Image (tube, rainbow, N blue to C red):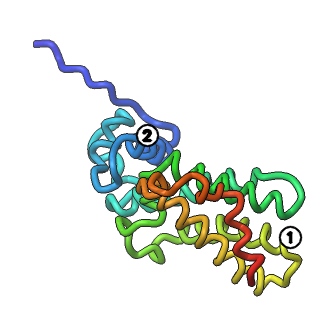
Amino acid sequence: MPRRSTKRYHHGDLRKALVEGALRLLETRSPAELSLRSVARLAGVSPNAPYRHFESKDALLAAVAEEGFRRLATVTAAAKGPPRKRLAQMGAAYVRFATENPRLYGLMFGPVLSGWERYEGLVAAGDASFAVVVEAVAAATNTDPKRASRDAILAWSAVHGYAMLAIDGHLGSCPAKELPPPEELVRIIDTR
């Protein structure tokens, strides 16, 4: 009797392959629809293999969100130019990242993943992503770090809100002449 052949193989970095697989699945599925089994299937490993790296689905989702924050920090930090222009470009890059990756962004900031503090890597990646914004705000406003952190929260809140409205389709009902481009959202720190 012929044996059934399954495509299973050893990964050099299974943890990374599983996170990348989950990121690919998030292109078409919500975080709630992901499972360790579906990610294992995509990676070509046994259904139990993910448990060598992730104790639960939440642990996998935390690793995916951590990677999301790394990617967000990369795209926002890539903004160049004079400090104010750079900050404006960062706001636009942030909105672009959110709207191009709505399910990943929803995982990063939504209610699916609770208990962030349990995942040190996720906390560190989130903090590092925010630090990029604080540094840019400090340079753009020429203020001390404490004030820059407060101003960064204001700017981030505006950009995050804009991104969420765009993702949820609520900006389409606004007349175009009233809709500011995301680059202009940094003006909120001018009113401080």
Provide the residue designation for mark 1: 139
Residue 39's spot in the image, x, y percent? 34, 43
Q: Name the foreground residue: 36 vs 164.
A: 164
Q: Measured along the vertical axis of the image, is residue 123 above or below residue 103?
A: below
Q: Amino acid at mark 1?
A: Ala
Which residue is drawn at the image coordinates 62% and 56% (left, top)? 94
Residue 63's spot in the image, x, y percent? 47, 58
Most extreme residue toward the left is 1
Query: Is residue 14 left or right of 142 when viewed as pictured?
Result: left
Q: Amino acid at mark 2?
A: Arg
Q: Could you say which quadrant of the image residue 113 lies in?
A: bottom left
Q: Quadrant of the C terminus?
A: bottom right
Badge 1: how crowded within 10 Å, few (<14), some, or many (20+)?
some
> How many discs appear?
2
Residue 50's spot in the image, x, y percent? 35, 49
Q: Measured along the vertical axis of the image, is residue 144 above or below residue 141?
A: below
Element under label 2? Answer: helix
Provide the residue designation for mark 2: 24
Q: Name the foreground residue: 60 vs 148.
A: 148
Q: Name the foreground residue: 4 vs 37.
A: 37
Residue 64 visible (yes or no) = no
